[in-house]
Amino acid sequence: MRRIVGGLAAVAAAGLAWGLAEAQAFTVRRHEVPVLPAGSRPVRVLHLSDLHLTPGQRRKVAWVRALASEQIDAVVTTGDNLAHPDAVPTALEALEPFLGLPGAFVFGSNDYHGPLPKNPLDYFGGPSRLRPKQEELPTEDLRAGLTAGGWVDLNNARGSLAAAGAVLDLVGVDDPHIGLDRMPEPAPLVDGASLRIGVAHAPYRRVLDEMAADGAELILAGHTHGGQVCVPFYGALVTNCDLDTSRASGLHGWPGVRPDSGGKGAYVHVSAGLGTSPYAPYRIACRPEATILTLVPEA
C-alpha cells in the first residue's frame, strides 16, 4: 500500500511540475485565413487573449512586448487582461509597444472581477459563474488606457480599422460569459471595407451564430484557455462555455451561414490565451499562446 501511495504521489508531483513549467512555455501560433478580396495584400493581425496579469509577472510582460519584433499590422485582444486589482499598469506596459498600431478590444469577466479560488472539478459541471464576493477591478482605468492608445472599444459596439491598405469592419460584444453581450443593431459594411470581423471574449454558440448571421467572415474569441488541462493526443476536456471541445482552440469553420455568402460559414479563431488564474497556475498539453493571423485573399 505504501508503494502505491508513494507512486501516486510521485505521479501527482510530476504532473504538477509539468503543468507549472508548461504555463511558462509561451508560444506563437500562426494561421493563414483566406478572407480578403482577390488582389489584396496580406494583413497580419496579432490576436491576444487571457493574459490574466498580476503585477509580478515580469516574464510574461517581457514576452508579450517582444512580439513587437513581428511585422504586425493590427492587434485585437479578446479580454481577461487582469487578475489583480493593481494590474492595469502591468497590462498597459505589456501592450504599450502595440498601442500605436491599429487595434481593438473587448473585455472578459476578469477585466471586471478578480479571481477567487475554486475547485477545478467544478468546470465539469458546466460554465463557471460569478460569485458574490468577487472583487471589482479598475475596468475603466484599463478602458481609458487602451482607448488613449487609439484602440477601438468593441464592447457591444461597431468600429473599423485601417491596416496594411485594408479597411476592416468590426463588430463586438461585451463578455457573453457573464451575460453582458448585446449584439449591435444591424449595419452595412463601412465604406471600402474588405471584410467584417466579429470579436467576443467567450465563444458561446449563440454569439457565433449572431456574428456569422451579421456577416462576419472571421470571428475572434478567447476564454477557453484551450481547455488548460488537456489529455495528450486527445485534447480539451472542457471549454467553460457551450462550445464543443473540438473547437477549444485554433482556427475552425463555423456552420452559421452569412447573408449573400453562397452558403459559406465564418472562420472562428479561439485563442488558448497566455495566462491562467493565479489560483490555478498550470497548463498541461496546452501551451499559452499568442496568434498571428495572416489574412490573405480567398482562393
Image (spheres, rainbow, N blue to C red):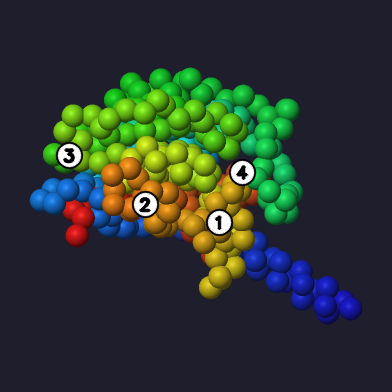
Question: Mark 2: which secondary structure?
Answer: loop
Give the percent coordinates (x, y) of residue 242. 59, 49
Gap in angstroms between the C-alphas marked 1 and 3 = 33 Å
The residue that disc 3 covers is 166
The residue that disc 2 covers is 265
* Disc 4 crowd, CA 10 A, few/some/many (<14, 14-19, 20+): some
Tell me if residue 108 can be seen: yes
- Identity of the residue drawn at 67% across and 42% down: 128
The residue that disc 4 covers is 278
- Identity of the residue drawn at 64% across and 36% down: 115
Closer-to-camera residue (174/184):
184
Question: Mark 4: which secondary structure?
Answer: loop
Q: Is label 1 or label 3 in front? A: 1
Tell me if residue 63 can be seen: no
The residue that disc 1 covers is 244
| Residue contact at pointers 2 and 1, CB within 8 angstroms | no
Question: Mark 3: which secondary structure?
Answer: strand
Query: Which callout, 4 or 3, points at the residue further toward the start of the chain?
Result: 3
Question: Mark 1: which secondary structure?
Answer: loop
Q: Is label 4 or label 1 in front? A: 1
- Identity of the residue drawn at 56% across and 59% down: 245
* Disc 1 crowd, CA 10 A, few/some/many (<14, 14-19, 20+): some
Gap in angstroms between the C-alphas marked 4 and 1 = 26 Å
The amino acid type of the residue labelled 1 equals Asp
Closer-to-camera residue (215/277):
215
Q: Is label 4 or label 2 in front? A: 2
Query: Which callout, 1 or 3, points at the residue further toward the start of the chain?
Result: 3
- Identity of the residue drawn at 72% across and 71% down: 10
Query: Which callout, 4 or 2, points at the residue further toward the start of the chain?
Result: 2
